Structure formats: structure tokens, C-alpha cells
Amino acid sequence: MARGEIRLIGLTKRFAEVTAVDHIDLDVAPGKFFSLLGPSGCGKTTTLRMIAGFEQPSEGRILLDGTDVAYTPAHKRNVNTVFQNYALFPHLDVFDNVAFGLRRAKRPKSEVRQRALQALELVQLGGLEKRKPSQLSGGQQQRVALARALVLNPSVLLLDEPLGALDAKLRKTLQIELKTLQREVGITFIYVTHDQEEALTMSDRLAVMNGGKVEQIGAPQGVYEDPETLFVADFLGVSNLMDATAQGARDGRCRVRADTFELTAGSGAIDVTGPAKIVIRPERIELESREAASGPNRLPGMVERLVYVGSAVQVIVRVATGEALQVLVPNTGKALPYEQGTPVQVHLPVEALRVLAVDEAGEPGPAEEAALAEASGRD
Amino acid sequence: MSSVAGTPVAPRPSAWSRFRGWLSNPWGRPRFLPLVTWGYVVWSIVPVLIAVQFSFNATRSRTAWQGFSTRWYWGDPVDSVWHDPTLRNALVQSLKLAVADVVIATPIGVLLAIGLARWHGRGSGSSNFLMLFPLVTPEIVMGVALLLVFTEVFTFVGTGTTAQILGHVTFSISFVVVIVRGRLFSIGRQYEEAAADLGASPTVALARVLLPLLMPAIVASAAVVFAISLDDFVISQWLSKGGETDTVPVKIYSATRAAPLPSTNAIATIMMLLTLASVTLGFLVWRAFTRGERRAGQSVVKDMGALEI
């Protein structure tokens, strides 16, 4: 029996003025760590809240293991939530918080005790059951929230930016712990975050959302390496985007013209013609001196700025098309032979250069985004 | 000497400018604002203290101090609060009304507050606004209106204790709603959602989560209702049947116009202490309930402001 399979079909949520979630279709296989990733107001939290049952969909279906639960009230759904600010009951101690759900399910007293303590052990909080939530650190509160949700053995666990309130170091630790925990318990996790690094490191699969729609679904590597839309390319990691005119495919590659330069892009929407964007990751650009090499896919430029970021040096190069490109050069301990004003040449390897169609719809303006965030009350 | 010969000697600042500097030195301790504050505190408290002092006067005078005595509380066999039946009745009547008011107005107000805070739809805005009506309506208008209603429309009510309780409840509910709603807004919906998420039906969520979290606001509003009911004069007066249903403020008012004795001061002092005690109790309970929340540095205590109406 497949436990914890979620299918969203044409799920839509309209608030008074805005459509927060716009006909999204999503399949989450059981036992997977699935992330909903996107900027503020993209509809990811609203989607999660509909799965949890806190918002009623305007349209569409939510299939949980094949049963439509879209109109089942929250307290009758076999899904549990870890809230962004944990929402631990401040008047109850840790044990009572964790036991809350078991007691509502009218489990016998001995079972309540045993399972609650077991859940606290699982999140490494044994011995703290008599504390009040206010006497715990942020990380501990987060674990209690996790134990409180997991103790009920839900089919699906929903997590709404659970690490958002913690400091960077603790986040890293808990990311790894969460992922390990998910493998251990084998429950489907649906994880909402705006932190792309978090989504990339933890997820089995992820969906990038924008303006209430799903832009791309896939494994982290696939989405990072092969972004299908400009938004995804821009939102996930750092991308250099350049205006270009696509001139159609040849030999499975796309010839593009950027300003007066002829380039070849090896991936992306290679069939596209007309106005397009070419995309390349900073770590994939090769920096060369002007004399060193010549060949296709090279642009002359000038070093504009060097930024030391520790593990690498970020070099901003103003290329002949007029655009500034970010190049990431790993820090090998040797000083770079460049300084501000050094004439250089950038090599954009064919297989690393992607061409993407310019989407007509565009992204939501700031005003619309603000209205969205307000309408959904969070996100 | 020679090196400073050319520099002009700065004139010593005048006494006035030094005083101004002392009063309003932006780098020093604030002095002007505390001065205003203390000025007001003294101004408002001194008359009360004088009234309290004369409740302990040894003679019948309310203006000339002749030594300390407790005769106006219980010593005097005829005119003390304890022995004068009209004063004692007034005290009993006041307490009766206040307790009934708390018992009736608090639960209704809490339910109204929850309903108004959680109801988002047509009419919710105007209902929220109308809830404030009793707070801004001049009490005398409300008193006249209630009197007319109880003597002309719902004649079975008439005047007297029942009418007074109904009157007090009418204006007290608003206070409960305002205080409880403030707390509701500051705790937000997240706890109810968490409860529902963990399998609690709306009724269970209300009983197990929402009401415990509202408890400080409920106790605080009960204390405030008790205090304002004790203090109320206008409505108690309009709806009084006279005699036994006169409350302490009504009694003090009529006594002061006739032949006042220090026993009037004594009963006023008792009233003041009762009011003070109930508000202090409410405040302490609030503090005790929300201690953990403040320690955690959460914003839940923002609604403390709601106490200071």
C-alpha cells in the first residue's frame, strides 16, 4: 500500500484580489523529500496550507493516497505540520505538547506516554519533557515541533520553512538531521522554503514556484543544471543572463548572436528563434588572457572588480557586449594575475551555455507580490 | 598666562541657561518629562489622600483634623459604615451588582470577542465597530435609554437590582470584548491551526488551547469589569428603585448633598481599595500567566496595552 502519496490536480486558491495558487499539478511519490521552492508570495505556503487543510481550495483536487481530501477539515486529515514559528502551545510543557495529538486520538494512557517519549528520543530531546516551550532554545523548540508532528505517524509531514528562524550554523546542522530523520522514518516530507541552498541539499525532488505557478519540477541537480525558464535560472544559484537573438538550431545546438558576436549554446531551448536570453553559471565561465587562446564562444572584456569571498574569488568582467559577467575562480592560494582594468577574455563553453526563451507573461510586479503575501497572510 | 592672552574668556553661563541645561540636557537623564508626570500624579492623588485621611477623623468634621480614629468604619454605633444600615446596604448592593456583572458579562464578552475576531465576512467590520459603541456613548444617554426601555417597553424588568445588573452588563461587555480581542489578535490563529492539525475538533481546540491562552485576558477583563461596575454612578442611579438598591456611589452622592459625615469618606475609601485590589489582582494574574511568553521575548505581550483603557 502506497502511504504518503500526494497528487495535486489543478489546485487553485483565489483570495479577494489575487490568485495565490494558479492551477498547479504536482505528484509526490511516497517516502520522498519534496521541496516547494520560491520567493515570497509565490504561493508555496498557500499550497502547503491547502494540503494541511487550513485553506479551502477554490478549485482542484488534493489526492492523498488516492482519496480526495480537498474538502476534509484539517483535524480529520492524516497529515501533520511543522509550523514556521513552531506554534508550540505555550501553556503546555514539552511532553503535553507532544502528547496532544495522541490524546485527541484517544490512545490509551500507557501508549501515549510511550510514544511521546519515543518521539522525543527520536529528536534527541529525552529528559526535557517537563520544560515549558519558553524555556527551550530555538533549535530545541524546532525539535519539539517535529516530534509533536511525527508522533502521530502521519502519511505526509508538511514543513513550512521550519529552519527559517534559526541562525546559519544551526540551520546547517538541522538540515542534515532533518534529511537523516526523513530517511529513517520514511514519511513523505513536503518542505516549503525560499532558501535555494536548503532545497538543493535536502530534497529528492523539488518544484520551483513563481506567481502561483510551478515553473519546473525535478531532482535538485536537474533543476540547477538545466533550468527550463529564466526565472528558475535566475532564482536558483547565481546566473549570468545576457540578451541575445537566437538563430535556430543546427546539429542539436543553437546559434545565437549577442551584440555582434556569434555564439553557440549547447543546451536549453535550442529550437528557439528571435529574442532570447543566454545563461551561464559563474563557475562555468573560463577566464583567459587575451593572447592565450582563440576560438569560438569567446568574448573580450575588461576586469571591473575583484571580490574576495573566501573559497573563491568573484571576478566581475565587463564584456564587449556591454554586459557585466560574474566569474567564479576557485581560491587555490595563488594570487590571480588580474586586477581592475586588466584586459581579459571569457570563454563560455558550448555545453555550459544555455539558451532560454524570453517568457511573455513576465514576473509579478512588486505591488502584486505584496498583495499576494498579504492575502495569504504569510509566505 | 601669555599663551592664552589672545583667547577671549568665555562668559560664565547665566543661572537661567544653566537651569535650562539641567532641565533639558539631551545627553543627561530626562528631567522635564518626569517633572510633568510627577506633577500630575501629585495633583490627582492629593485630594484622594485628603479624603482618605478624614475618613479616620476622630470628630464629625470633614475639614478639621482632630486625631486618628476608626469610629467611622465600625466604632460609631449609629453612623459608622458597619452600623448605619443604609451605608451597609449600599456596600452590599454595590458588591452584588459587581459580582453579577462579572459573572454575566465576562463569558458573553469572551464569546463575542472570539466570534468577532474570527469572523471575516459581510458585516464583520461594522459589528466590530458597533462593539465600541457602548464605550463612546455618553453614559447618561445610555442610562436614560435603558430606563425608558425598562419602564416603558420591557415593563416586567422595571427598576431595581435586575435593571441595574442588565445596565451594567450592557456597558461592561464592550470592555471584555476589547481586552480579549486584543489578546486574540496578538496570539493569532496559529495555535488553533496547530490544534486542528493535531486532530482537535474546533470545540476541543477552543477548550484545550484557545481558552487557556486567553485566560490572562479573561481574568484581566473580569477585574476591570468588577472595578467599573463598583465605580459606576450614572446607570446605577438611573435604574435604582431608591432605598435598598442605591449603590455606594449613589449613596455618597446623596449623603454629600445632605449632611455629610466622615463615614461617607470611609465608605468611599473602602470602595477605592476594592477597585484598586481588583485591578491589581487582574494585573498580577496577567503577569503570572504571561511570564513565560515575555521571557521568550515573543511579541505576545503587545496586548498588555489593552489593559490600560
Image: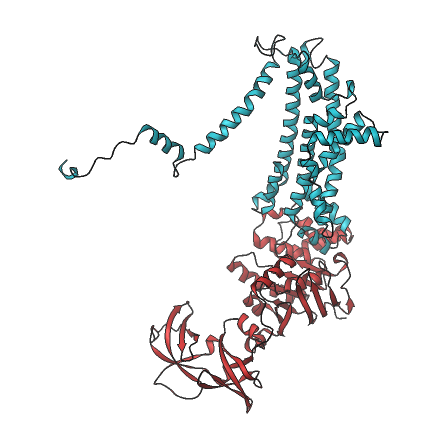
Chain colours: A red, B cyan
**Figure quadrant of the N terminus of chain B:** top left
Horizontal and vertical percent position of residue B69: 61, 10
Q: Residue at x 75, y 27 (%)?
A: B97
Horizontal and vertical percent position of residue A204: 62, 71
Instruction: Decide: is B35 above or below A375.
Output: above
Q: Among all residues in the image, which is located at the extreme right?
A: B156
Horizontal and vertical percent position of residue B143: 74, 29
Residue B186 vs residue B206, the one in the foreground? B186
Q: Is residue B243 visible?
A: yes
Residue A367 vs residue A54, the one in the foreground? A367
Locate residue A121: give its quadrant: bottom right
**Figure quadrant of the C terminus of chain B:** top right
B183 sits to left or right of A255: right
A56 sits to left or right of A167: right
Residue A283 vs residue A96, the one in the foreground? A283
Q: Residue at x 80, y 25 (%)?
A: B159
B146 sits to left or right of B306: right
Horizontal and vertical percent position of residue B287: 61, 37
Q: Residue at x 57, y 46 (%)?
A: B296
